[in-house]
Amino acid sequence: MRVRGQYEGIATDTVGLAIELSSPRDLDRIIADFDQCFTGLRDVGEMCSAQRSMILTAYQRGTLENLAANHSHILSDPVQNLHQRCVSQNSDQPVGHNFFVNATGFIDSGLPWAKQFNELVTERLNTTIYHIAGSNDLKAKNSLLAAMTRSPDQELMSSIAVYLAGRSLAGEEFLESHYGQILDRAKNQAIDMTRSIGASTGLRHEMIVRAVNQLQRTAFGSFDHLQGLVTTDNTGTLGDYQIGTLRVEVQFDGSVKAAKLRQGQEVHHILAHELQHAGSAQDLDRYRCGLQSNGQGLEVNEGMTEYLAQLSSGSPGIELLDNGNMRIKPGVPYTAPVYAMLALHEQFKSGRNSYFAILFNAYHGAVNDHDDLRQALDAFYRYDAEVAAQLS
């Protein structure tokens, strides 16, 4: 079947996807790299945690010059990555606007690396970060940051690198301080659910252990929005997980000009969803994750992810009707694919077919036969298309 789900940017070829998901991958490497601090932090400088630690340690010890002399790329790489973000623009609002507006929040908080960066900018440009941030010319702010990061001298490069490392750690600690207890609770629920359903579907023990180990390690990623929500284009995204990092994010509520923290129950749902992504089978090359590969299978992957998130958190979005049927409550993300996954699970529990078991096991990296997986994918997409048509 070649089909395009309502959330997919490209059509999914279920034969090709089944073959891809059944090809072997080093699924344990993500855990090893995370433990050795080699996975990404989700920050604008694209640092790994080992790199951030080296920069901040050198800053605190006053040995930045030694680091620059012996390992200059550790300082220069995040600065050049920031420069590339400035010139590429991607889908974000102007990166320069975000960079300077957020900096005022760190300066106001009295963080030394932010104050030091502001002092250097004032000395070099004869203006303060506050003045730059207050400008309404977003294009000029982005151009300024692009110029600063294009070919900085040693002092400026070190200052920017330290600032990037400092705000990355501060942002991570910001999320942890507000949502850490919710994350821990959501982890325990996700682990219990994975073990329970895995036992019913025959998921191999080593695959359950791998998923549990990834869930236990999952942490918050860098988050630099201490001064308003100025990095997204208001797409409605509540949270995010970046493939291969074991790093989750909860975004602010409100608008760009009036950002605010999210409430506990909403945060719990966001984390329940993102944790399922984190616990699924995936590659460090950010190509495969769960049931999707390079954009194909996005519909079935999100359907499984949100359905499992519902189960792990007590199924708040699944309602049992008086006639014994079930429905997905309004407001649940990915309604059609979640309902399709619910239908397949109910059929599996009643012994009618094994499609859900095949998809659940494949989501966690265990595929016994790619033709069986193709049939399960086809069954999902048929249900998904029917439900989507009814909802529309």
Image: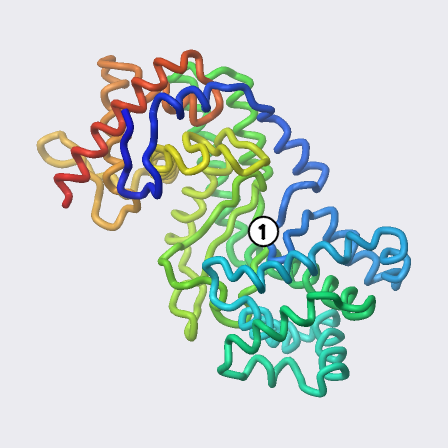
Query: Image point 25% across, 42% down: which residue?
Result: 335
For the residue marked with disc 1, what is the amino acid?
Arg
The image quarter containing residue 284 is top right
Circle 1 crowding by C-alpha within 10 Å: few under 14, some 14–19, many from 20: many
Q: Quadrant of the N terminus?
A: top left
Q: Quadrant of the C terminus?
A: top left
Q: Is residue 213 left or right of residue 375?
A: right
- Residue underneath mark 1: 42
Query: Image point 48% across, 62% down: which residue?
Result: 92
Q: Is residue 79 among what the camera can see?
A: yes
Query: Image point 45% across, 62% down: which residue?
Result: 232
Q: Position of residue 43 (x, y in %)?
A: 60, 55
Q: Position of residue 249 (x, y in %)?
A: 50, 52
Q: Nearer the viewer, residue 95 or 150?
A: 150
Q: Is residue 43 left or right of residue 351?
A: right
Q: Position of residue 383 (x, y in %)?
A: 21, 29
Q: Is residue 197 among what the camera can see?
A: no
The image quarter containing residue 110 is bottom right
Query: Image point 82% across, 55% down: which residue?
Result: 72
Residue 47's place in the image compared with 104, above or below, is above
Q: Is residue 219 left or right of residue 381?
A: right
The colour scheme applied to this rendered structure is rainbow
Q: Position of residue 109 (x, y in %)?
A: 64, 74
The image quarter containing residue 156 is bottom right
Residue 187's place in the image compared with 195, above or below, is below
Q: Can you name the residue that lies furthest to the left here?
A: 323
Q: Can you name the residue that lies furthest to the bottom here?
A: 126
- SS type, badge 1: loop
